[in-house]
Image (cartoon, grey):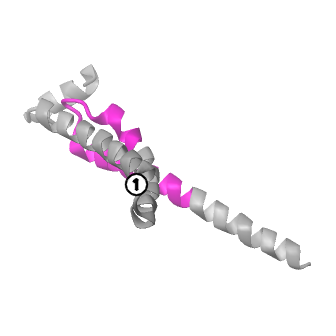
């Protein structure tokens, strides 16, 4: 935590809040475990349904992996949630641009 934010917390009289070592480690290992599960589901040779779930989890896990640098002791959970929402917003914009460009291309092909 930076000196300035720590001094602001001290001025309020509240102890600095944030994740404990166990909580940070659990969050980090959960994200890594999700990515490993996605890879196992993609490379299993038995079910197309499991492959589809794995493909979706690869995208979700790849986006969730952006949260790993924030899985540190002392970082507030609200920061982790805020960064997660920013990542989801970027994904929504990218999806919107992809769908919009596909529609424009379809209009172009009809002309």
Q: Would residue 48 be found to the left or right of residue 104 on screen? A: left
**Residue 91 x, y percent position in the rendering:** 51, 55
Q: Quadrant of the C terminus?
A: bottom right
Q: Would residue 53 be found to the left or right of residue 104 on screen? A: left
Dominant secondary structure, magenta: helix
Quadrant in which residue 28 is drawn: top left
Q: Residue furthest front?
A: 46
Q: Nearer the viewer, residue 28 or 91?
A: 28
Q: Would residue 96 be found to the left or right of residue 20 on screen? A: right
Quadrant in which residue 23 is drawn: top left
Above or below — where is 20 with respect to 87?
Answer: above
Magenta segment range? Answer: 64-93
**Residue 58 x, y percent position in the rendering:** 44, 50
Q: Which residue sits at x=36%, y=44%?
A: 35
Q: Quadrant of the N terminus?
A: top left
Above or below — where is 84 with respect to 73?
Answer: below
Q: Which residue sits at x=72%, y=67%?
A: 102
**Residue 40 x, y percent position in the rendering:** 37, 47
Above or below — where is 39 with respect to 107?
Answer: above
Q: Which residue sits at x=16%, y=32%?
A: 9
**Residue bearing mark 1:** 57
- Tell me if residue 68 is in the magenta stretch: yes
Can you see residue 18? no
Q: Secondary structure at mark 1?
A: helix
């Amino acid at each position: 935590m930076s000196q300035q934010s720590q001094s602001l917390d001290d001025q309020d009289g509240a102890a600095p809040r944030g994740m404990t070592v166990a909580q940070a480690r659990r969050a980090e290992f959960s994200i890594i475990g999700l990515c490993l599960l996605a890879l196992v589901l993609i490379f299993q040779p038995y079910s197309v349904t499991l492959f589809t779930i794995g493909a979706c989890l690869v995208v979700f896990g790849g986006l969730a992996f952006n949260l790993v640098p924030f899985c540190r002791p002392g970082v507030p959970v609200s920061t982790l949630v805020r960064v997660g929402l920013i990542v989801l917003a970027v994904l929504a914009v990218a999806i919107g641009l992809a769908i919009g460009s596909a529609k424009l291309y379809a209009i172009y092909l009809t002309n």
